[in-house]
Amino acid sequence: MKKRLLSLILAALMAVSLVACGGSSDNAGGAAADADAVTDTDAGGEETASDGAYTIVVMPKLVGIPYFTMTGDGAKQAGEDLGVNVIYNGPTTADAAQQVTMLEDYISQGVDAICVAPNDAAAMTSVLRKAREAGILILDWDTTADPSLTDCSVHQVNDQHFGEHMVDKLVEYMGTD
């Protein structure tokens, strides 16, 4: 039951965050300030769930660029709407090793779910396996992680369908003569 509920929440959370990408943001570089999201901070500066609700980590490839700022805004709003604790945080550079280190910390905190946009899918495999073994649900977004380790994937476009469509359009515009 918990797994099904969290899968639904994850799908809704990511759908709302991706819809947010269609808007504009006056805060092009302020994602780092948003990293504490919908959580409390304990005396040691660690993020903690405050109300016993599910805690979901949403990790972009990096924070501080408009696209991921907008997804963070959407994820945090969805968390508020659904009564879910959302921790939106990621590295300040597109660094897979930083993502791995950060995710290991969140795994040790016992979060309920991880939503990650991997910088390098292969580099994520070992940490996502640890998360799976700890009973944490895993969702990938923006970039596919190892499908055997994810419970759900959310992507704006199917790359194969997009490529086929572009080739069809190229042929259409060039003509067949």
Image (tube, rainbow, N blue to C red):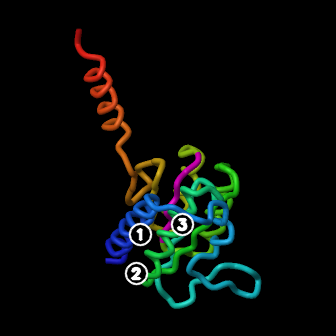
Q: Which amino acid does label 3 sit on?
A: Gly
Q: Name the residue under label 3.
A: 72
Q: Does label 2 or label 1 sit earlier along the sequence?
A: 1
**SS state under label 2:** helix
The boundaries of the magenta stretch are: 113-119
Q: Name the residue under label 1.
A: 13
Q: Do the residues labelled 2 and 1 touch (CB within 8 Å)?
A: yes
- The x, y position of residue 148, in whole percent, is 41, 50
Q: Which of marks 3 and 2 is in front?
A: 3
**SS state under label 3:** helix
Q: Nearer the viewer, mark 3 or mark 1?
A: 3
Residue at position x 38%, y 63% in the image: 15
Q: Determine the CA span between mark 3 and mark 1.
A: 10 Å
Of residue 173 and residue 64, the one placed in the foreground of this image is 173
Residue 171, picture quadrant: top left
Q: Does label 3 or label 2 sit earlier along the sequence?
A: 3
Q: Which amino acid does label 2 sit on?
A: Leu
Is 22 positioned to the left or the right of 134 in the image?
left
Any part of residue 145 in sight = no
Q: What residue type is labelled 1?
A: Leu
Any part of residue 56 in sight = yes
Number of on-image labels: 3
Q: Are marks 3 and 2 in contact (CB under 8 Å)?
A: no
Q: Does label 3 or label 1 sit earlier along the sequence?
A: 1
Q: Are marks 3 and 1 in contact (CB under 8 Å)?
A: no
User: Looking at the picture, does residue 81 appear above or below residue 6?
Assistant: below
Label 2 crowd (10 A; few <14 / some 14-19 / many >=20): some
- The x, y position of residue 34, in whole percent, is 63, 72
**Badge number at residue 82:** 2
User: Looking at the picture, does residue 52 appear above or below residue 94?
Assistant: below
Tell whether position 18 is magenta. no
